[in-house]
Image (tube, coloured by chain):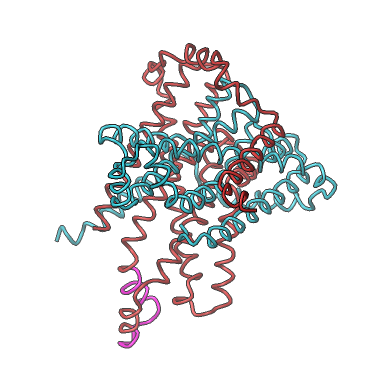
């Protein structure tokens, strides 16, 4: 036993390694390919370089699909954020005083959150047809899930004093929303929305593959027909786009929350 | 006067941008109503799930789980290795700067595209998916691990250095013991994400339950598709609950 105890760490490491080895056998993966056989990677790199950047200005399909992707993320964030805000007003139990309804809507929000967006996009593509519209609907649903929870939490953490003093002066519910809750909630609302826009840009690009439209679809097509030089140019565009948007949203958020 | 108008100008700009964005995406209110109605009709048509298919879905589900497990394991080992070069108490500033910017570039590439590139190199299959999950870990885990390493009190490193320890000994005796609970908890959190991702990557052709779902949809077998959806939901919720439970045991605050 002392032997086992002394080498406990190594035992655990061995067991984990062995389990991972079993998994590779189950999946029929040969990891050694990575280290021994490098011709896959070198072949691909040969085909990818140099990236064909001329497709960006040759025809304006690329630029218009980039704009479409941004528009998808924007619409999804804005509409989803508004719906999520209404939802979270109902779900936070310090504002909506009916425990049953707020708990049910909380439960609904967490249910929406666990549904993978793949499922939502597949359903919408069948229902409304492939294209940017299906992508926007998917982003709206996933935004409701993620933002609803964040909004509910920040609404429940609001300081109740200003709402209480407004109520003491005889303000009605709407006035309390407008003059006490909204001003206090607004900075975190906007900064959360910006953060969400950042996430939604990524999923808007990804949804393109499943028929969501935008630049992701163009990239998928380029990979499908083995135009790797175009694909690399598109990937570079996407990375630059995502990095720029991430930095802009971080900058605005730091300005708002200052 | 102008200051009072600023919020209204912002609202106006928002409305104009929204209008153009709706035009670009083909988003119309009547289309929205019709689309939502059609979706509900479609979801109702999917019921009931075909109960016989659940047995066939067991192996693909196990495949999805093992893809995520393997990808997370390899990814966290790789991320730990990279994080050692991104923590300022272990390396020089310029190395830290380069590695950190590489990590943030990786974070901005969606895993789907990593998979597409890998498929071009290694072909369709589990290998590409595992590699995509592994590389996808670097962006998040690399940063979290590096931040956790930087939190190691400098007195520990200084005293080991004073005792004549080399870099490997400092990492092994000074940093890893403190880091272990955080490392496991972050990796578990990433595992939750990777389960969802491996469903998604499977749909492109890596196999597993995601592939079954996509295939059922494209073959118009909607009852079977609903069975896949149910399996995926149960899988995701169960993994999330287990991971939250273990993370609570490890007593690291949740995200």
Identified at 31% across, 69% down, the residue is A184
Which of B36 and A168 lies nearest the eye of the viewer? Answer: A168
Q: Position of residue B180 (x, y in %)?
A: 47, 50
Residue A163 sits in which quadrant? Answer: bottom left
Compared across the picture, whether B173 is left or right of A217 comes to left
- Quadrant of the rendering where the C terminus of chain A is positioned: bottom left
At 43% from the left and 39% from the top, the residue drawn is: B139
Chain A on-screen colour: red
Q: Is residue A124 above or below residue A231?
A: below
The answer to whether residue B238 is left or right of residue B1 is right
| Residue A13 relative to residue B208: left or right | left
**Can the viewer see residue A243 in this picture?**
no
Q: B116 or A99: nearer the eye?
A: B116
Q: Is residue A191 visible?
A: yes
Q: Residue at x 41, y 35 (%)?
A: B82
Q: Position of residue A204 (x, y in %)?
A: 48, 40
Chain cyan in the figure, letter: B
- Position of B44 with respect to A241 (left or right) is right
Indicate whether residue A174 is drawn in magenta: yes
Q: Residue A167 at x, y = what percent?
A: 35, 84
Tell me if residue B127 comes above or below residue B36 in the rendering.
above
When the figure is inspected, residue A247 is found, relative to residue A107, above or below; the finding is above
What is the chief secondary structure element of the magenta stretch? helix
Classify A34 as above or below B77. above
In the image shown, does A122 or A249 lie closer to the viewer? A249
Q: Which residues are magenta?
A: A167-182
- Figure quadrant of residue A247: top left
Residue B182 forms part of the magenta stretch: no
Quadrant location of residue A66?
top left
Q: Who is closer to the viewer here, A61 or B117? A: B117
């Amino acid at each position: 036993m002392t032997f086992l105890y002394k080498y406990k760490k190594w035992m655990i490491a061995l067991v984990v390694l062995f389990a991972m080895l079993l998994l590779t056998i189950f999946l029929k993966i040969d990891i050694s390919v990575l280290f021994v056989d490098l011709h896959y990677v070198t072949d691909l790199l040969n085909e990818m370089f140099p990236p064909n950047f001329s497709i960006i200005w040759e025809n304006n399909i690329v630029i218009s699909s980039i704009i479409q992707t941004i528009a998808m993320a924007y619409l999804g964030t804005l509409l989803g954020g508004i719906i999520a805000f209404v939802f979270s007003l109902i779900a936070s139990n310090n504002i909506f005083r009916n425990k049953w309804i707020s708990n049910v809507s909380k439960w609904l929000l967490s249910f929406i959150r666990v549904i993978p967006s793949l499922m939502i996009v597949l359903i919408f593509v069948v229902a409304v047809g492939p294209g940017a519209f299906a992508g926007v609907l998917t982003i709206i649903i996933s935004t409701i899930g993620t933002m609803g929870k964040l909004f509910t939490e920040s609404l429940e953490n609001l300081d109740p004093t200003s709402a209480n003093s407004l109520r003491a002066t005889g303000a009605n519910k709407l006035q309390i929303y407008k003059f006490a809750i909204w001003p206090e909630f607004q900075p975190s609302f906007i900064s959360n929305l910006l953060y969400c826009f950042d996430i939604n840009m990524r999923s808007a690009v990804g949804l393109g593959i499943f028929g969501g439209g935008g630049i992701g679809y163009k990239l998928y097509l380029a990979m499908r027909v083995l135009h790797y030089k175009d694909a690399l140019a598109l990937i570079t565009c996407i990375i630059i786009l995502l990095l720029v948007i991430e930095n802009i949203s971080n900058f605005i958020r730091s300005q708002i929350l200052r | 006067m102008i200051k009072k108008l600023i919020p209204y100008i912002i609202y106006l700009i928002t409305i104009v941008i929204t209008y153009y964005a709706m035009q670009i995406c083909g988003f119309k209110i009547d289309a929205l109503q019709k689309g939502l109605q059609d979706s509900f009709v479609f979801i109702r048509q999917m019921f009931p799930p075909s109960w016989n298919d659940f047995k066939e879905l067991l192996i693909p589900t196990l495949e999805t789980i093992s893809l995520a497990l393997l990808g997370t394991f390899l990814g966290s080992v790789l991320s730990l290795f990279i994080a050692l070069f991104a923590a300022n108490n272990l390396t020089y500033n310029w190395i830290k700067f380069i590695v950190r910017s590489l990590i943030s570039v990786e974070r901005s590439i969606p895993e789907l595209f990593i998979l597409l590139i890998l498929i071009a190199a290694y072909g369709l299959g589990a290998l590409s998916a595992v590699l995509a999950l592994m590389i996808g870990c670097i962006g998040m885990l690399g940063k979290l691990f590096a931040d956790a390493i930087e939190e190691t009190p400098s007195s520990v490193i200084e005293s080991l250095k004073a005792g004549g320890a080399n870099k490997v000994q400092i990492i092994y005796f000074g940093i890893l013991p403190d880091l272990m609970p955080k490392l496991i908890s972050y990796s578990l959190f990433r595992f939750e994400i990777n389960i969802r991702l491996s469903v998604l990557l499977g749909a492109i052709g890596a196999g597993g339950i995601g592939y079954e779902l996509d295939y059922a949809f494209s073959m118009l077998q909607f009852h079977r598709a609903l069975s896949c959806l149910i399996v995926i939901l149960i899988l995701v919720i169960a993994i999330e609950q287990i991971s939250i439970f273990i993370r609570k045991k490890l007593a690291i605050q949740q995200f």
